[in-house]
Amino acid sequence: MKILTTGGLGAVGWPLVALLREKGNEVWVLDRPHHHGLNGRYYFCGDIGQYPQIEGIFDREKFDVVYNLAAEFGRINGEDFYETMWQTNAIGTKNIIRLQEKYGFKLVHFSRSEVYGDYDGVMLEDVTDKFPIKQMRKRLECRG
């Protein structure tokens, strides 16, 4: 299959790219950071939060599946850089869904760790079904 991974240079994305390639798929990576080792045929530098940046990719290449892993995450990002988090996580996801409607590829969307909120117990998959999600309340302090 021909697959695109958004956020393909991330902590989850890069191992997924390797696994999908190992299984014989043609896997392309879309991510914001410029990566010297990936310049070329299977790498796009772009931001899913900016529709014009990514629309052209789908005009040029036809993908069977898109794995959407692109995300801003983390406590400090959410509190101090919320505009960037909103642009990527909300607007970017909407952009990918709009492109899926237009081009008809299968979409696998990864959630973000922040959906679990503040939870003190052992985190199992059904926690959010059994307990209401609470806003994170503990602010982390950066120490230099």
Image: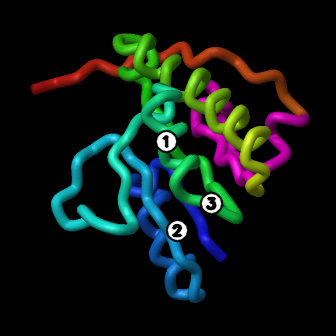
**Position of 22 compared to 30: left or right?**
right
Outermost residue on the front side: it is 60
Residue 38: name its quadrant.
bottom left
Q: Residue at x 36, y 60 (%)?
A: 43
| Looking at the image, residue 61 lies above or below residue 21 | above
The residue nearer to you, when weighing 67 against 79, is 67
Image quadrant in which the N terminus is located: bottom right
Label 2 environment density (alpha carbons within 10 Å; few <14, some 14–19, many ≥20): some
Counting residues from the N terminus, which is met first, the one under dot 3 or under dot 1? 1
Q: Is residue 15 left or right of residue 108?
A: left
- The residue indicated by pointer 2 is 16
Mark 1 secondary-structure assignment: helix
Range shown magenta: 107-129
Question: At label 3, which amino acid type do we have?
Answer: Lys
Distance Cα–Cα, label 3 vs label 1: 11 Å
**Residue under the image location 58 percent in, 39 percent down:** 113
At x 90%, y 34%, the residue is: 130
Instruction: Give the number of the disc on residue 56.
Output: 1
Q: Nearer the viewer, residue 35 or 42?
A: 42
Residue 17 in picture, x, y percent from top left: 48, 69
Within 10 Å of disc 3 (Cα), the crowding (few <14, some 14-19, many 20+) is some
Q: Residue furthest left?
A: 144
Distance in Å between CA atoms under marks 2 and 3: 20 Å
Which residue position holds label 3? 62
Q: Position of residue 131 (x, y in %)?
A: 84, 28
